[in-house]
Image (spheres, rainbow, N blue to C red):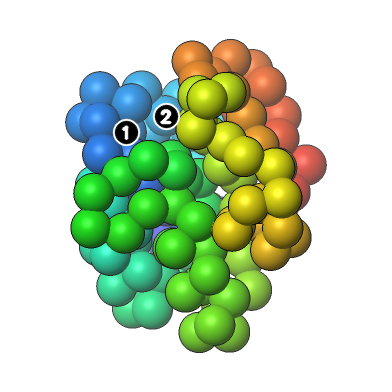
Amino acid sequence: MKQNGKKKILVVDDSEMVRNFHSYIIKMFGYQVGTAENGAVALEKLLAGDYQLLVTDINMPKMDGYELIRNVQEQGIHIPIIIVSTEEEYKPGCAGAELGSGIHMVKPTDPGKLVATIKMLL
């Protein structure tokens, strides 16, 4: 749910440290943040909540980022997506990459670049 007119962003990563890092940066710029430790939890939150943007890792247990993106699109959820992964994990032309999933950023993420990208997409 939106509160105070703030945009709400869902951060998905199996690393608690990465989730906390991205959440901290995003909150500093006035956005609300929800988190999920894998794609399955993220999909539940996206179906139940009011999120305006998704920031997701690729390599996660239970449901990876590509599967999450496929599910989001199959459920008719229209939301900008930022994929944040290591260069080795991201395979252009693969699953989520060809789904028009949005923008890819390499870990470790530059905070300024992440926020600039979020602002551009929202």
Instruction: Find residue 41 and report its horizontal and vertical position in percent.
Output: 25, 62
Give the number of callouts: 2
Q: Are marks 2 and 1 in contact (CB under 8 Å)?
A: yes
Amino acid, disc 1? Arg
Q: Could you give the CA–CA distance between mark 2 and mark 1, rounded to whole angstroms?
A: 5 Å
Crowd around label 1: few <14 · some 14–19 · many ≥20 (10 Å): many
List x then y, in percent, for residue 26.
48, 33
**Kind of residue at disc 2:** His
Place of residue 90 in the rendered image (x, y in percent of width and height, measured from the top left): 57, 36
Q: Which mark is residue 117?
A: none
Q: Residues within 10 Å of mark 2 (few under 14, many from 20)?
A: many
Q: Does residue 116 appear to the left or right of 22 in the view shown?
A: right
| Percent position of residue 72, x then y | 51, 72
Residue 62 in view: yes
Q: Residue at x 78, y 42 (%)?
A: 120
Q: Which mark is residue 19?
A: 1
Residue at coordinates 25% horizontally, 23% vertically from top-left?
Answer: 17
Number of the label disc, if any, that sits on residue 22 = 2
Furthest-right residue in this view: 120
Q: Is residue 72 shown left or right of residue 114? A: left
- Is residue 39 shown left or right of residue 37? right
Nearer to me, 119 or 64: 64
Query: Which residue corresponds to the image point at 50% horizontal and 56% vertical from the top-left?
Result: 66
On screen, 52 above or below 111? Answer: below
